[in-house]
Image: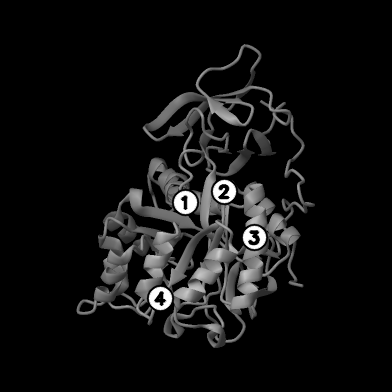
Amino acid sequence: MPSGARDSADLRLRRGARATTNNPHPATDHSPLILSGANVVLPTGTVEAGQVVVDGTRITATAPENAHVIDLTAHWIVPGFVDLHNHGGGGASFAGGTAEDVLKGVATHRRHGTTTVVASAVTGDLDFLARHAGMLAELAQQGDIAGIHFEGPFISPCRKGAHDEQLLRAPDPAEVRKLIDAAHGHARMMTLATELPGGLDSVRLLVEHGVLAAVGHTDATYEQTLGAIDAGATVATHLFNAMPPIGHRAPGPITALLEDERVTVELINDGVHLHPAALRLAFHHAGAARVAFITDAMDAAGFGDGRYLLGPLEVAVRDGVARLVEGDSIAGSTLTLDRAFKRAVTVDGLPVGDVVAAISANPARLLGLADRVGSLEPGKDADLVVLDAAFDVVGVMRRGQWVVAPGPS
């Protein structure tokens, strides 16, 4: 068991329990609500002194006569965050934990605004990964997670990061298919070193089965990366990290991934994985429509410093930075998406609308969920985050239920 100081806001849940706080507002019974007076960030722009109407589990265009009004003047309302790449939180692992562990981690991230999360695996024995995918698929079927991301074992030993080198393997399409099948229709993404033997065939197989092919933990050249994109790869796994840097004679995968309009690039905006200038570079070249903020979180997110396991590898977290005990490689993050949001606005100086695109709309589109989540529009799930003037989370709603209720108005 990992050791660490439990986050005072952490929730310990049984399967099926709601993550709610003491709620001064009558939303737990799905009674109609008008959230009024806030800066509401819509796909078309920000509406000052706007409103969001919630009826049942959905956002609606008009408010019933019996709707309760909550005054959120001087606040922001943004869509619930969508995390494509997350290994756990709250002291619990998505990569190797039980179903209860996964629910505990999901609850932690929900409190920080992430209303849709994909559970990411790490490199492991293929049979174990298949069995674990079966369990995660059940949680996806229940709606607790939005699917499964396989990060490894089909990655480069040259850029392994916090993955066990002894368990790495070239991407054999038959083994890729085994994991897809084990996920029972809930495989959302797989990270590959596409330059390895079988890499391009595996990309084509993933695309054929509706699974996102992501280039990552790769030692590919610029030209090899272009080949992977042409084969159907559409995501860059934590761009800049676990791949060759840009060279003026060897531009490498980063350049290929940034310049191709078919690719969405993941960024970990925690101030550790990326220098602010690298973040600005990505936004400048890819544009806000092709960036997806992720956490790449591990168990310590929302939990505290201490010793943890990431797959079979031991991780030490000090001052919120996770590194392998052996080798000192960065081992995921302790990031939550609310911190990524606040940093993007207050430190990086990005427009709020661009941050909302990167943290909600773009990942929802990639996952094929944009008809339900990722923006505040009538007919979509009532998944939203209330931020104060300092961009700190004061309210989180998922499907019309408060996970964190804003204070009395």
Q: Residues within 10 Å of mark 3 (few under 14, many from 20)?
A: many
Q: Which residue, given by chain and number where applicable, does mark 2 sit on?
A: 116
Q: CA distance from mark 3 to mark 4?
A: 24 Å
Q: Which residue, given by chain and number where applicable, does mark 4 sit on?
A: 193
Q: Tell me if residue 361 can be seen.
A: yes
Query: Which residue is painted at 26% across and 74% down in the image?
Result: 222
- Determine whether the residue tagged by mark 4 lies in a helix, strand or loop: loop
- Circles 4 and 2: CB distance less than 8 Å? no
Specify which label sits upstream in the sequence, 1 or 2.
2
Specify which label sits upstream in the sequence, 4 or 2.
2
Q: Amino acid at mark 2?
A: Thr
Q: CA distance from mark 4 to mark 2?
A: 27 Å
Specify which label sits upstream in the sequence, 2 or 3.
2
Query: Looking at the image, is mark 3 or mark 4 nearer the viewer?
Result: 3
Q: CA distance from mark 1 to mark 3?
A: 16 Å
Estimate the x, y position of residue 293 in percent, counting from the top left.
Answer: 46, 55
- Determine whether the residue tagged by mark 2 lies in a helix, strand or loop: strand
- Circles 2 and 3: CB distance less than 8 Å? no
Q: CA distance from mark 1 to mark 2?
A: 10 Å
Q: Which residue, given by chain and number where applicable, does mark 1 sit on?
A: 367
Q: Amino acid at mark 1?
A: Leu
- Circles 1 and 2: CB distance less than 8 Å? yes
Q: Which residue, given by chain and number where applicable, does mark 3 sit on?
A: 136
Specify which label sits upstream in the sequence, 3 or 4.
3
Residue lying at the far right in this picture: please name it. Answer: 14
Specify which label sits upstream in the sequence, 4 or 1.
4
Query: Which residue is painted at 52% across and 77% down in the image?
Result: 153
Q: Residues within 10 Å of mark 4 (few under 14, many from 20)?
A: many
Q: Amino acid at mark 4?
A: Ala
Estimate the x, y position of residue 363 in percent, counting from the top left.
Answer: 45, 51
